[in-house]
Each structure stands twice: as C-alpha cells, then as structure tokens.
Amino acid sequence: MLHKDIDMEHQGEIILYQPDEAVKLEVRLEDETVWLTQAQIAELFGTEVPAISKHIRNIIRNGELEKEATVSKMEIVRLEGSRKVKRVIDIYNLDMIREFSLNS
C-alpha cells in the first residue's frame, strides 16, 4: 500500500515554480510536502524520464528511502489523440526529490 492516493479533485495547493526562464513547474503541495511526477523531476533537473526512473528504482532498492513513505498515486485526465483518457501515475514527495538531487 502506498503512502496515500491523491485524486484530481483534491490536489492541495498548486504553485508555479519558475526560478529562471528555462524551467516552469506546477508544484503540488499536499500534507505539507511537494509532490512531482517523474516528468516534472526530469524537467527540474534537466534530464530525461528514463534517468529519473532508474535513479528512483535504485534509491528504493538500496533502501535509501521507502516507497511507502515517498510515492503516491494520482489520477490524471489527459488528451491522447482526440480522446480524454484517465491514467494513474506515480508522484514523488520532497524526500525523494531531494534524495535524487543528492544522487545525481
């Protein structure tokens, strides 16, 4: 069981983070922490999603952080072609984001 589920109707506060013209992120604040998707983490650190995925797997496998404490699920609705599709994606809290920055 993961830390908790966050749905689109209760996302907490959303903040736009833009330290310079190159990066602009919508940051979700929920339960006093920041939550980002792998795509957002990749954008923040200027890398690709497969690199983020690999680092996160290693962080969890090496026991640096526990999945149950740092990963949640979020349901999103997005356009795929002309269809609206619901997807459930993993989101990662500030502890995981910080650990990624230390290991990259």
Image (cartoon, rainbow, N blue to C red):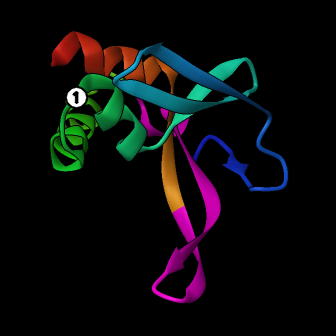
Q: Position of residue 99 (x, y in %)?
A: 32, 17
Is 97 positioned to the left or the right of 32 in the image? left
- Which residue is pictured at 48% across the width and 51% down the height? 90
Identity of the amino acid at label 1? Gly
On-image quarter of the C terminus: top left
The residue under the point 71% across, 49% down is 6
Q: Residue furthest front?
A: 21
In percent of width and height, residue 62 lies at 20, 29
Q: Nearer the viewer, residue 69 or 50?
A: 50
Q: Residue at x 36, y 45 (%)?
A: 39
Q: Residues within 10 Å of mark 1 (few under 14, many from 20)?
A: few
Q: Which residues are magenta?
A: 66-88
Dividing the picture into quadrants, the one containing residue 51 is: top left
Drawn side of residue 12 relative to residue 48, left or right: right
Check if residue 38 falls in the magenta segment: no
11 left or right of 81 in image: right
Please, what is the dominant secondary structure of the magenta stretch?
strand
Where is 51 relative to 34, above or below?
below
- Residue 57 at what x, y percent from top left? 23, 42
The residue to which callout 1 is attached is 46
Mark 1, secondary structure of its residue = loop
Residue reaching furthest to the bottom = 82
Q: Quadrant of residue 48?
A: top left
Q: Residue at x 46, y 43 (%)?
A: 37
85 within the magenta span: yes
List x then y, in percent, for residue 70. 50, 32
Tell me if 21 is positioned left or right of 74 in this view.
left
- Number of labels in the image equals 1
